[in-house]
Image (tube, rainbow, N blue to C red):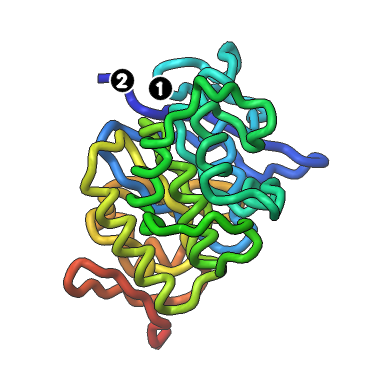
């Protein structure tokens, strides 16, 4: 079976600076990846490439067996569930949850020009239920809490039953309760039929149980990538974050704390 995503020697340059530098990465079917690294390490840029919303300056990208450089991204996007703060900022605040999720069925952000024939309300209802928003009221998006807004975005990402699910910093605006609720939701989704998952996080504590692989980035370069137990170890994490760290794992959950450098 072909990889879900394959990056070969991918670089992204901005004003002569390499934001992502010579990254090669293969994501296989059934794999659940977490992406970690310091602020500015290139995590969001990397996931934007996977989402088709950004093309690299050099290197090659294949998504679902198709070369990104020679593919109409409108054909790919319904097969890629994508959640990110930049995408959420494009939602007009007056949209209702179902309008947001309905539009995604046609690969769109805005519902205004979506052919109603491409929208199935039962799929929208199923996606909202999967994201924990089965009883979402038909109020404007702006009236929902940050946790509820995030679950609406997750429903949007799930509604097309995508082959790949990409989540960029989904925990960023959540309190402890919201994070734990989302961790449980993502663990349940990870145990489902989605081909591959990639989640950008800041904390090991937010990694959902069931995730299988990890990538560590530092200054735009991959410092480690592979099975999660081999990557999330003291030496690799300390190198990626440039500080002594000790990794522990209990009951399927990771955590990290500063290590005594002596």
Marks 2 and 1 in Cβ contact (< 8 Å) = yes
Label 1 residue SS: loop
Nearer the observer: mark 2 or 1; the answer is 1
Residue count near mark 1 (Cα–Cα under 10 Å), binned few <14, some 14–19, many ≥20? some
How many neighbours does mark 2 have within 10 angstroms: few (below 14), some (14-19), or many (20 or more)?
Answer: few
Residue placed at 43% from the left, 51% from the top? Answer: 199
Instruction: Give residue 53's position: percent from left, percent from top.
Output: 62, 33
Residue at image mark 2: 2
- Nearer to me, 24 or 132: 132
Q: For residue 241, say whether it is visible.
A: yes
Q: Is residue 193 left or right of residue 38?
A: left
Residue at image point 69% right, 42% down: 18
Q: CA distance from mark 2 to mark 1?
A: 8 Å
Q: Is residue 166 above or below residue 173?
A: above
Q: Residue at x 62, y 54 (%)?
A: 85
Residue at the spot x=41%, y=70% of the render?
Answer: 179
Position of residue 203 measured from the top left corner of the image (x, y, whole percent):
44, 69
Numbered mark located on residue 64 in the image: 1
* Residue 42 vs residue 188, the one in the foreground: 188
């Amino acid at each position: 079976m072909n990889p879900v995503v394959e990056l070969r020697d991918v670089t992204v340059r901005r004003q002569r600076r390499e934001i992502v530098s010579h990254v090669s990465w293969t994501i296989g079917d059934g794999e659940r990846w977490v992406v970690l690294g310091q602020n500015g390490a290139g995590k969001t840029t990397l996931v934007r490439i996977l989402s088709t919303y950004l093309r690299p300056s050099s290197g090659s990208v294949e998504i679902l067996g198709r070369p990104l450089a020679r593919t109409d991204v409108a054909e790919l996007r319904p097969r890629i569930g994508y959640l990110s703060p930049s995408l959420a900022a494009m939602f007009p605040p007056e949209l209702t949850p179902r309008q947001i999720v309905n539009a995604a069925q046609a690969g769109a952000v805005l519902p205004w020009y979506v052919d109603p024939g491409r929208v199935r309300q039962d799929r929208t209802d199923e996606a909202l239920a999967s994201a924990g928003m089965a009883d979402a009221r038909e109020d404007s998006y702006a009236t929902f809490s940050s946790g509820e807004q995030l679950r609406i975005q997750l429903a949007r990402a799930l509604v097309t039953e995508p082959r790949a699910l990409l989540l960029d910093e989904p925990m960023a605006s959540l309190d402890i309760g919201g994070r734990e609720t989302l961790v449980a939701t993502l663990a349940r989704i990870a145990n489902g039929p989605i081909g591959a998952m990639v989640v950008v996080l800041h904390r090991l504590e937010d990694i959902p149980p069931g995730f299988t692989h990890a990538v560590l980035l530092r200054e735009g370069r991959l410092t480690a990538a592979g099975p999660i137990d081999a990557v999330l170890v003291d030496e690799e994490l300390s190198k990626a974050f440039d500080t002594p760290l000790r990794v522990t794992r209990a009951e399927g959950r990771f955590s990290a704390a500063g290590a005594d450098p002596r």
